[in-house]
Image: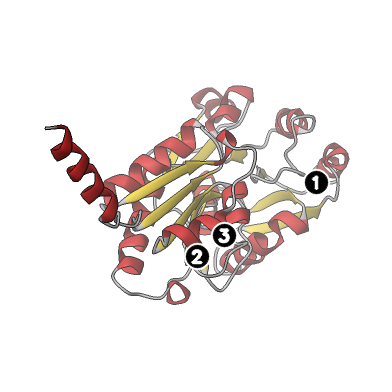
Amino acid sequence: MQLLRFLLLALLLLIPLPAFGYDVLVLQSLHEKGYEEAVNGFKRECRASMRRVVLSEYAEADVTRITREEHPKLIVAVGDRALALAQKQNSTPVLYMMVLNPKPRRWATGVSMLLDPSRYLSVFEALGSQKVGVVYDPSRSGAYLKRAQAVAARSRVDLVLREVRAAKETPGVLQSLRGKVDALWMLPDATAVSPGATEAYFLFSQGERVPVVTFADVYLTMGGAVALTIDRFDIGRQLGGMAQSVLEGKPVEEIPPEHPRRAIIKSNDGVVRQLKLSSVTGR
């Protein structure tokens, strides 16, 4: 019996072990509720084999080594840090999600966190707003505002733009819009909408009696009128559809970046009534 066990062990050692293989390497910046929702949506849509690496659990992650040794067919980057690391290698195509301002790369495409500008402009039209003030940092939101201006040119909305280069400039720049706009558009721009400057938007709203349309429902409790938020689970499903196309052979460079396909609209009914605005509800 002892000899038999020895022979079986020796035989197992001689058999080459299968290489560790899977289709999709999911790089996730950190454990965060929104990221988890997006990944769950991705898993619902894409049934490929996966390995997930949460970068906050490691002091350093060598993505180039992982892709060289484990040969995934696709990298899915969840969050800005994950995308930055994924783009340090150039052997495996990359899809991204939950990234605010992705920089275009030949081997990378995905779903951004920014809704199509037309979604916001339709809200302003429903509110009856014609002159819409926007404070933004060109280095962060310049490309997005160019698209928004192109859409606005075909609508009844006129965007009144103001640039800032530092967060401390926002309150003063907002004051330059007094008497010139009938709504404010709050962008997810870390310079224009910093924690220290957020209150200035709602003080302006109260003083000028104009609505603030924002990107996160947390601002409704501070005095925002309407919030257009993203559906993170659906973003994951949207990216999952892209991943299936890549795994079936479609080159990443033939897949254009997309905005989230689903927007959730919420309003602060008290502010809407106070400013005598048309109600904007639904999804």
Q: Which residue is mark 2?
A: 109
SS class, disc 2: strand
Residue at the extreme front: 3
What percent of the width, then of the height, locates residue 233?
A: 37, 41
Classify residue 106 as left or right of residue 197: left
Q: CA distance from mark 2 to mark 3?
A: 19 Å
Mark 2 or 1 closer to N-term?
2
Name the foreground residue: 9 vs 257: 9
> Of the residues shown, which amino acid type is indicated by label 3?
Thr
Name the foreground residue: 127 vs 198: 198
Verify CB contact (< 8 Å) between mark 3 and mark 1: no
> Of the residues shown, which amino acid type is indicated by label 2?
Thr
Classify residue 149 as left or right of residue 31: right
Q: How many residues crowd around disc 1 within 10 Å: few (fewer than 14), some, or many (20 or more)?
A: many
Mark 2 or 3 closer to N-term?
3
Name the residue located 19 percent from the left edge and 45 percent from the top edge: 7
Name the foreground residue: 207 vs 173: 173
Q: Which residue is mark 1?
A: 177
Where does the C terminus fall, quadrant-wise? top left
Mark 3 or 1 closer to N-term?
3
What percent of the width, then of the height, locates residue 133?
A: 71, 49
Q: CA distance from mark 2 to mark 1?
A: 36 Å
Examine the rendered structure and indicate whether residue 246 appears above or below residue 164: below
Examine the rendered structure and indicate whether residue 123 appears above or below residue 276: below
Where does the N terminus fall, quadrant-wise? top left
Classify residue 37 as left or right of residue 141: left
Q: Please say whether residue 270 is visible from this viewpoint.
A: yes
Task: Look at discs 3 and 1 and give the one toward the viewer.
Answer: 3
